[in-house]
Amino acid sequence: MAQQALNGSGMDDSRKDRGMREAPAAFVAAGEQRHEVLAGLVERVTFHSQESGFCVLRIKARGHRELVTTVGHAAMISAGEWVTASGDWTNDHTHGLQFRARFLKTSAPTSLDGIEKYLGSGMIRGIGPVYAKRMVKMFGKDVFDLIEAEPARLREVEGIGPKRADKITSAWADQKVIREIMVFLHSHGVGTARAVRIFKTYGVDAVQVMSEDPYRLARDIRGIGFRTADLIAEKLGIEKTAMIRVRAGISYALTEAMGNGHCGLPLAELIPLSIKLLEVPDELIQTAIDLELTDGTVTADTVADTPCVFLSGLYHAEKGVADRFRHLVAGPRPWPDINADKALPWIEKKTGLTLAPSQAEAIRLALRSKVMVITGGPGVGKTTIVNSILQILAAKAVTLLLCAPTGRAAKRMKEATGMEAKTIHRMLEIDPKTFGFKRNEESPLECDLLVVDESSMVDISLMHSLLKAVPNHAAVLIVGDIDQLPSVGPGQVLADIIGSNVIPVVRLTEVFRQAAQSKIITSAHRINQGQIPDLSKPDGESDFYFVPAEDPDQAVERILDMVKNRIPKRFGLDPIRDIQVLCPMNRGGVGARSLNIELQAALNPVGENKVERFGSTFAPGDKVMQIENDYDKDVYNGDIGMIEDVDLDEGEVAVNFDGRTVTFVFGELDTLVPAYAATIHKSQGSEYPAVVIPVMTQHYAMLQRNLIYTGVTRGKKLVVLVGQARAVAIAVKNISGRRRWSKLDEWLREPAHNDAAQRRISE
C-alpha cells in the first residue's frame, strides 16, 4: 500500500486502539518503568526544528477531549499523520500541561480528515488545503494509491490541469525518494533538514552515494558537517583509522578554517586540530596530509617562514591575484597624459565643489596610475574623489565600468555617481550550470577603467575571478574602508594590497565640515581612533544615541520598544523596512537568532498563511536574508528581501529583492533566514536608514573595534547603541582581531615565485 510505503509503518487501526491501553514492548527498555502511551492525529505542527528534530505538536488524542500539546523529536512530521508516543505528563511553568514524549512513531494517515490535513500541509508541491479537500472528496482513502498508480486521474479534480497534475506526480515521486533518504539518515542516527538538498545534489542515487562515501555529504551539502558524516560512516562500519576518514578530516579542518577567513593553516595548528577532531595518532594525520598533497587537494608553503598547508584552490587564487596585479601595474595607462593643473579647476567648476588639497592630490595620483587604492572612513570625501576621477576620464572618452560586491552597494554607487553600477557577479555574467563566470581571460570585460567599490568585502576567490576578466590594457581603481571588518569569505584582500606597499594607496583621514556635523560620523572616527564615543544624552535632536541596559532581558525589552514604537514615532521610519537591528553575534538572548523571533512576533504576527521550515517561520510581510549564493536565482549571500506571498498549494514562497520577485520552493528555505536582526558581519556593504546595535559584555568574544566601527557606519540617518557603556569601551579598546592566514601580501612583494618553496610537509 502507498500509505505503508510513505513511511514504512503497517500499523492498523486496531493496533492503534490497543496502543492507548498497552505500551508496545519496543517502547519500554528492559528494567525501565513503563511510560504512558499516547496515540492520535497530528492536528497542527506548532514547531519543528529539522536540524534537531525537536517538535511541538497539537494532537487530537484518543481518550482526550482537548487537543494535547506533545513535545518530542521526529525527523519529519506533518499535520494529518498518525503519531504514537511513549512518555510522561509534565506541567511546564510557561506552557502548562504537556506530554513529553521519549519516543515518537509516525505513520501515514488513514482517516479522511488526516489524509486531507497531510496533503494540505505543503509537503507535496501543487497541493494546498483547497486541492487537498477536493482530492479527498473525489477519491477518498484511495488518493495515495491513485497519485502513484493512476496519476492521469488527478485531472478529474476541479482545477487540476495537465501542468498541476504533472507537478503533483513529480513532487510525490520526489517526496518518496526524500523519505528514503530520511529513513537512511535516521537509521544511522541522523535527523537532518537537508534531505531535500541531498536529493537535489545526488538525485535518485543519493542513498548509494551516501553509503559508498558518507564524507561526501560534508563536502557537498551546506549545513552537513564532518561530525554528521562521521556518525553515518561509523554506523556503516568505517573504522576510525580508515584513510578515507582521516583525509576527509584534514579537508574538513581546512574548510572550517576557510569559514573563519583563512586561506590555510600553520602545520603546527592543523595537526593538533586534526588529532583532536579524529582521535587518531599523528602519524596517520601526517600520512593523510601527504596523500592530500599528492592528489593536489592541498598545497604546502610558508607564510613568514611558518610552514602552512593551504586548500589548493585558495592558494592558487592568492597567487593568481598577485600575478594579475603585477602584470597590470607594469603596463601603460589606457589614457594619454592628463594635465592635472587644468583638469582640477575644470572639475571644480563642473561640480561646484572646492577640492581640499588631500582630495586634489588623490585625483592627481589616480590620473597617472594604472592601479590605485583609495581608502578611508565615512565623511572623508571618497565619493567626491571617485566622481571627479570618473568625470575627468569620461570627458577623455575612457570606457568605464563600476562594480561592487553586493546589490545594495552597487545601487548606492549608482546613486552617488549617476553611472551604471553592477554587482561583481552580474558583471562577470555567472553561468549557473558551471558555477563559473562567462567573463574571463578568453572573454574579458570591455573597459578602460574598472572601479571596485566596498572592496573590503571582496574575498580572494571573487577578486581572482574579477581580475582574470580585466583586459590587460585596463586600469583598476579599488575603493574601500580598510578599517571595516574583512570579507566574510577567505582572505584579506584589501588589507594585503595596502600592506604590500606595491600598489599606490591614498588613505583619507580628514573629515569634512559638513560630515563632521553628523554624530554618526564623528562617533565612527572616534571609535576608529580608539576613543570612546560620546554616550551622554544629547541636548537636542541627534543621529547617534546610547540607551543603557544592564542585562540581556532589559536590552531585549528596550530594543523591541525602540524598533516598534520610539523610532517610528519620532523619526517617521518604517519599523520593518527602514530599521535594522545589527548584532555582534548570532548566539545568546541578545543575539540575532533570538532577537529575530522576538521582533517577528512584535512586528509581523503570523497569521494562517505561513510555512514553518528549518526552524524558522515564513509569512507575507517578513523581512528575510539570503545566506548563500544562488546563481540560478541570481540572489547572493547577504541580500535582503520581503516575502510577498506564501503559496501553500504550490509549496512556494515569493520574495521581493529590490523590486525583483524570486520564488523559493519550501525545501529551499534553508537558504533564507528572518532578517529583522542580522549579524554585523552580514551587514557589510549595506546601509540602512536606522540601525540598532546591542552591545553587551555577553558578546565579549566578538567585541572588537572593527566590528563596532562597521556596525556604526551602516546607519545613514540614525544609530542607536543599546547596552552597557563598559561593553562599548571593551569593543573600542580591543584591536586584537584574529590574524588571517594569507600569503597574498608576500606574493605581491615578490616579483617572482620560487617554486622550490612549495614542498611536501614530510620533507
Image (cartoon, rainbow, N blue to C red):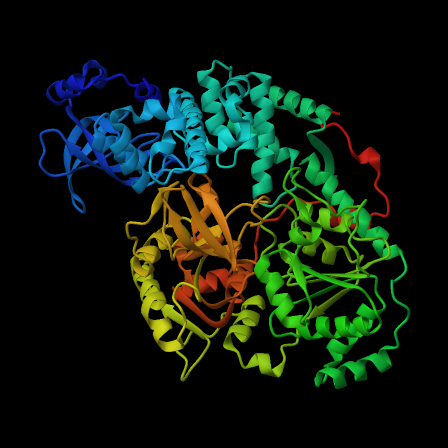
Say which quadrant the N terminus sits in: top left
Residue 10 figure quarter: top left
Residue at screen point 41% across, 76% down: 536
**Residue 597 seen by the camera:** yes
**Residue 23 seen by the camera:** no
Residue 166 figure quarter: top left
Residue 558 figure quarter: bottom left
Q: Is residue 3 above or below residue 355?
A: above
Q: Is residue 339 left or right of residue 23?
A: right
The image shows a total of numbered marks equal to: 0
Residue 245 location in percent, x, y?
56, 21
Residue 615 location in percent, x, y?
37, 42
Q: Is residue 173 left or right of residue 44?
A: right
Residue 622 location in percent, x, y?
39, 55
Q: Is residue 507 above or below residue 585?
A: below
Q: Is residue 325 left or right of residue 67?
A: right
Say which quadrant the C terminus sits in: top right
Tell which of 259 and 200 is nearer to you: 200
Tell which of 628 and 722 is nearer to you: 628
Residue 168 location in percent, x, y?
41, 33
Residue at screen point 42% across, 41% down: 666
